[in-house]
Image: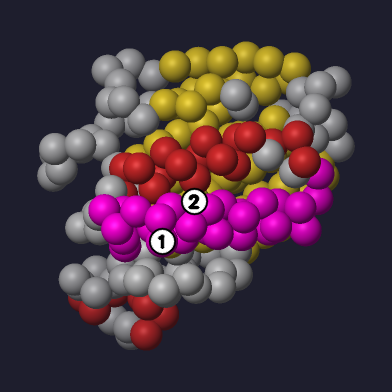
Amino acid sequence: MARVTAVGLTGAGRVRSRNEDCLGLSEWVRQRPMVTPIQLSMEVREPSLFVVADGMGGHAHGDAASLMAVTRLMGKSQTLTDEDSVIAAIKDVNDAVFDLMKANVAFRGMGTTLAGITILSDKIIGFNIGDSRVYRFNHNYLQLLSADDTNSFLHTSTEERTGVNSHSLMQSIGGASERTDIFPHSWSRPLNSPERFLLCTDGLTD
């Protein structure tokens, strides 16, 4: 039986007054800024979900969007047994965000990225939408497993890729005035031991 040790840390950073990020470790969800990391250790007896979300800065209630996405996905963690079920769950989260925006004008435009892994007894399923990332620590370097949904592929030089438009999202959960179909990225791989993964928002990668 696989055993997982997870360490999580989140904070508002130096730019914004409130934390737009949210993280979930198994059944533990946290958005309030933290001074020290939390560490959890558990045996994987059923699908175990680990996820990060980054509410989109400048949009209304980005913090509410990231918390809603993590909480709703956590509620479906026991159904995440293959890539199809993961993709379906993320699309359900997207629908729920748009339903809230339709019901309450104060939440119009709210949006978030999402990235994570779910661990089963024999495999790992990874996923993302937006520019939050999943890395695998492999032979002393970080191997990027997720795919950024940004317009950086349009740029050809380092200066352009790091410019003001380099993080314009091509898709996200919510984040639009009208309901939008999404196409989350996913992958799966056999569960090997030991393995290390890093889940992070662009607050770290930047």
Residue nearest the viewer, comparing 119 with 56: 56
Q: Earlier in the sequence, mark 1 or mark 2?
A: 1
Which percent across, then down, holds residue 103?
A: 40, 55
The image quarter in which residue 176 lies: bottom left
Q: Residue at x 61, y 26 (%)?
A: 26
Amino acid at pointer 1: Lys
* Residue 138 visible in the picture: no
> CB under 8 Å between callouts 1 and 2?
no
Q: Residue at x 75, y 43 (%)?
A: 80
Tell me how far mark 1 sits from mark 2, CA to CA.
Answer: 21 Å
Residue 147 vertical placement versus 42 (above, below) = below
Which percent across, then down, holds residue 167?
A: 31, 67
Q: Which mark is residue 181?
A: none
Left/right placement of residue 26 relative to residue 2 reads left
The image quarter in which residue 16 lies: top left
Residue 45 vertical placement versus 141 (above, below) = above
Colour treatment of the image: secondary structure
Left/right placement of residue 117 relative to residue 168 reads right
Question: Under tag 1, what secondary structure?
Answer: helix
Which percent across, then down, holds residue 57?
A: 24, 54
Q: Which mark is residue 102?
A: 1
Q: Give the number of the mark in front: 1 or 2.
A: 1
63 drawn magenta: no
Q: Residues within 10 Å of mark 1 (few under 14, many from 20)?
A: some
Numbered range of the magenta stretch: 81-109
88 drawn magenta: yes
* Residue 22 visible in the picture: yes
Residue picked out by circle 2: 114
Residue nearest the viewer, comparing 79 with 118: 79
Q: Residue at x 28, y 26 (%)?
A: 33
Amino acid at pointer 2: Leu
Residue 67 vertical placement versus 82 (above, below) = above
